[in-house]
Amino acid sequence: MSSYGSSSNTGSEGLRSGDGAGSLRPATPPENKPYRAGFACLVGRPNAGKSTLTNALIGQKVAITSSKPQTTRHTIRGIATTDDAQLILVDTPGLHKPRTLLGQRLNDVVRETLMDVDVIGFCLPCDQRIGPGDQFIAAELAELRRGRKRPVVALATKSDTVDRDRLAQHLLAIDQLGDWQEIVPCSATSGEQVETVLGVLMKYLPESPKLYPDGVLTDEPDDVMVAELVREAALEGVRDELPHSIAVVVEEMTPRADRPVDRPLMDVRVNIFVERSSQKAIIIGRGGSRLRDVGTRSRQAIEELLGQKVFLDLHVKIAKDWQRDPNQLSKLGF
């Protein structure tokens, strides 16, 4: 039986802590109330708003966002801690009908993740009608629940993009799509019902002590986050076919030895891989203008992530047909 949500309102060893700006309150469970902690996963077709909602729930950017499909390729863990519960949120690639070996591996990542979480949030954007992609995922979730029962909450994302009549139609279509524990409309961009989504997901977590210390927002290593930030910048403004062909690898991150203690500088060398020489030319741009823009935007985000100045050295390389080559996929981290 479905129900509709009501209105409401730099670490080490791979642990990324918040500066307090976006963090929730430290965990002190109320007296006589059991604490809950566990894992949740957001699923949905590509560009359903999963990464944007992940960042809104955590209160800080832990997943890159883009209007291009297949932006997410790694399961980024974001951690939200409140007085009552701790939610470890796993952001996955969008489930889709794969056309390449990379697509197959991304789908495998999603299915493996779904087997391990305590609750699933199924994102269905309000600005798009229910389609074959949503039906495909709903069928996958139904099959999964037959094998091992786990709650699924339907999330009507991007609710700020439609009027009330369209939202009502969308909620009814979601209700008819499957059997959900709850249906919650929300907007990560405006913040509408984000806290409600967090509370609903936490409700289905098992009783457990905290799994991460207070203040930790993600357990992703710095080099993975740096690569993702460069890829996010590289995705901006490229043609639809190019995003799938972009892969980013951090070659090295080394503190500059001759810098004073109060003015550290990190040397970061990053390779951007594409599949063809024509794609390399697009990334570099006329006279290197586009690559400089990618460097400027990603360096600012990396400095915010690391909390220090960065010298970013970007190189564009060709890895021919890497999406279909198992050896190159492994080298690129897939």
Image (cartoon, helix red, strand yellow):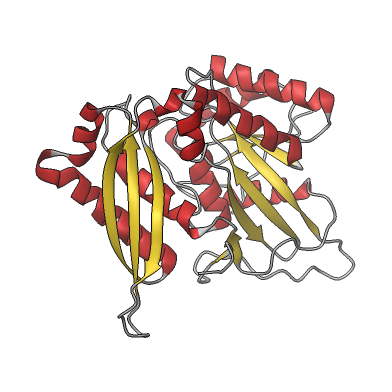
In the rendered image, residue 279, in percent from the top left (x then y), is placed at 25, 30
Counting every numbered tag in the picture gives 0
Q: Is residue 47 visible?
A: no
In the rendered image, residue 253, in percent from the top left (x then y), is placed at 40, 62
Q: Residue furthest front?
A: 327
Q: Is 52 above or below relative to 28?
A: above
What's the residue at 82%, 23% (across, down)?
Answer: 146
Q: Is 17 above or below relative to 7?
A: below
What's the residue at 74%, 22% (across, down)?
Answer: 142
Q: Is 165 above or below relative to 158?
A: above
Q: Nearer the viewer, residue 284 or 307?
A: 284
In the rendered image, residue 175, in percent from the top left (x then y), is placed at 68, 23
What's the residue at 48%, 45% (across, down)?
Answer: 52
Q: Is residue 164 visible?
A: yes
Q: Nearer the viewer, residue 319 or 101?
A: 319
In the rendered image, residue 217, in percent from the top left (x then y), is placed at 58, 61
Quadrant of the drawing holding the N terminus: top right
What's the residue at 56%, 55% (across, down)?
Answer: 220
User: Residue 119 lies in what quarter of the image?
Assistant: top right
